[in-house]
Amino acid sequence: MIMRSLVFPAALALSALAGQVSAQATPDDSCIWASDGECDEARYGGTGACQPFTDTADCSATAATAQCQYAFDFECDEARYGGGGYCADGTDTFDCALVASGVIDDSCQWANDGECDEPRYGAVPNCRDGSDTTDCQAMVSAREALFDLVPADILARLGDDSCRWAFDDECDDAQFEGTGACANGTDRTDCRAIAIGGDDSCQWANDDECDEPRIGTGACTSGTDQTDCADVIFLRNRTNACDTAFDGQCDEPGTGTGTCEARSDTADCIGRGRPANAGDHYFGRDDRFLVNTAQAPWRAIGQLGGESGFCTGTLIGPRTVLTAAHCVTEDGITVSLPDTFTVGLSRGHDNGVAQVVSAIFAPDYSPESAPPGGGNGNDWGIVTIDRPLGDSTGWLPIHVLTADEMLLVSEGGLVVAQAGYSWDTGDNLSGHVGCRITRAYSDNTILHECDTTNGDSGSPILVPVEGGYAIVAVDSQFTDAEDRNAAFHWGNLAVDSRAFAKAAAKALIEAGP
């Protein structure tokens, strides 16, 4: 099961930076295309010409069918029509309409482009189930041809694709050394290649880049980019999620004490070295450790969570949390609120849980990424929670780099620290102390060498100040290095406090005591 950095279903439009936006909006017909007899809100499968809540009359009939939490995701989830049964009969009407009528066609705008876009086949849901028939039938035929080559005994063990996480390109069946998120025999398609020892059936195979989930870009299904991933296959489906990870002692069954689950104590059991072409290369060595969240500054760092994923955030006031913009918006237009903020979560304990009530992000933020220094300095967001957790844990101040510190950056010598909820450490907060900021750009971003990965989005980059630590940046993304001949082709990009210091000060005032 792949967990992305935090992206939540769109909730409402963000009109301006100045006002924190609640999770409610008043439906109206303010769109220019309202009341034309056609639903134009994308959340209901409409044209997308109208923003959410602005084409109410036209979309009301469609909205009435939104009884299932998975409605309007373009995937038919009613069991009677071959869906996974995640929606009761009659509650996923829009998504199931074509399949239910038997009119499966090529009505999607992306039909006949050579790529299947229907979610029921595990594709990116650009088309509603039943609307990209030609492309998807071709894909299914090619997939079944590969299954014809699988020995009968392995085929029987593969079973079917009844798992909720089937078709996510990652093998989750533990009997094939998958993640274990699926019961044995329920993740057939994702585990086919691994079950036979791997192959190069992915369209991106043999391009000199590993594209399998977690150990590479994720563009290929597990086991289908065997040649390109040969150097990093030993990391497949391995984590550091054990509560005793990074303590120097292997605790996995068989090779260690057995107090950790299999493949959950990676750094201790197979070493910290990481090949340059690994998806989580950590600049050749994994230097993280599990921090003590009872101590400062770590106790003020927490996890923003919801149904669709997780990010990291840091208390900068009693009820104010600093994070990345892409943790609170998917499209740069609408706010997508996480559900909760859990501060100091680690090793089964936490320092408090609060509900998220509102969020703002940079008004000129765009989810489109630019080259380093090309305009990425808007990936910051500020969240307000319903309880003053900071009164008990404390919070961290924001610090803007001084001229002397900028000089150290230019010399590659500004030493910092970082901590976040990396995807592979589960609910344990991992940190890296003694890493460096290596470059600062005029677009208010920095490059750093702290060991961050998915889930660390929004995590703080910290500098020592009198009396403790202060936040100088928030982690944003991986980015292509300027020198493609460098040992590592990826750098870590963060948005520094030049971009958000004033907005944060204003948000603290508006949040009140």
Image: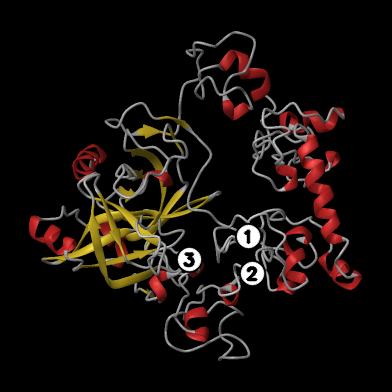
The secondary structure type at the circle numbered 2 is loop
Location of residue 64 with respect to 501 vertically, above or below: above
Q: Residue at x 45, y 64 (%)?
A: 422
Q: Tell me the distance, in whole angstroms, between the alpha carbons under discs 1 and 3.
A: 16 Å
Numbered circle sitting on residue 427: 3
> How was the colour assigned to the protein in this rendering?
secondary structure
- Residue position for label 2: 227
Q: Is residue 213 left or right of residue 360?
A: right
- Disc 1 marks a residue whose amino acid type is Met
- Which mark lies nearer to you, 3 or 2? 2
Numbered circle sitting on residue 1: 1
- Which mark lies nearer to you, 2 or 1? 2
**Which residue is most to the right?**
152
Q: Is residue 491 left or right of residue 132?
A: left
Q: x, y percentage for residue 69?
A: 64, 39
Q: x, y percentage for residue 251?
A: 53, 87
Q: Are marks 2 and 1 in contact (CB under 8 Å)?
A: no
- Disc 3 marks a residue whose amino acid type is Asp
Q: Is residue 13 left or right of residue 124?
A: left
Residue 395 visible to an observer of this rendering: no
Label 2: how many Cα within 10 Å (few below 14, some 14–19, many 20+): some
Mark before the other along the chain sequence, 3 or 2: 2
